[in-house]
Image: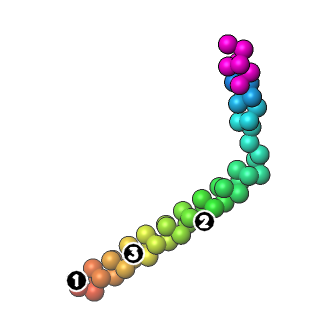
Amino acid sequence: METQTNSAKKNQGQKQTNPQTDSENLQGTFAAVLIVGGIILLSWFGVFGLFLERA
């Protein structure tokens, strides 16, 4: 029982993260979302242009 309690305390100590590392990961995520959003927006305007051209 004592080893489980000690290992649980060690795991709790390891769960602390560095805020600077988290912000770096979020910056990459934000860039990826902007790229995907730009692709979706460009494709939407392309399809809309085709619709106007054929109408």
Amino acid type at mark 3: Ser
Stretch in magenta: 1-7
In the image, residue 24 above or below residue 37 = above
Q: Nearer the viewer, mark 2 or mark 1?
A: 2
Q: Which residue is mark 2?
A: 31
Q: Give the quadrant of the N terminus.
A: top right
| Residue 15 point in image, percent of width and height | 71, 36
Q: Which mark is residue 55?
A: 1
Determine the image quadrant of residue 42. Answer: bottom left
Please tell me whether mark 2 sits on a helix, a strand or a loop. helix
Amino acid type at mark 2: Ala
Q: Nearer the viewer, mark 2 or mark 3?
A: 2
In this view, the residue farthest toward the top is: 1
| Residue 34 point in image, percent of width and height | 55, 66
| Residue at the image point whose x is 72% and y is 14% from the top | 2
Residue 6 in magenta stretch: yes
Q: CA distance from mark 2 to mark 3?
A: 18 Å
Q: Which residue is mark 3?
A: 43
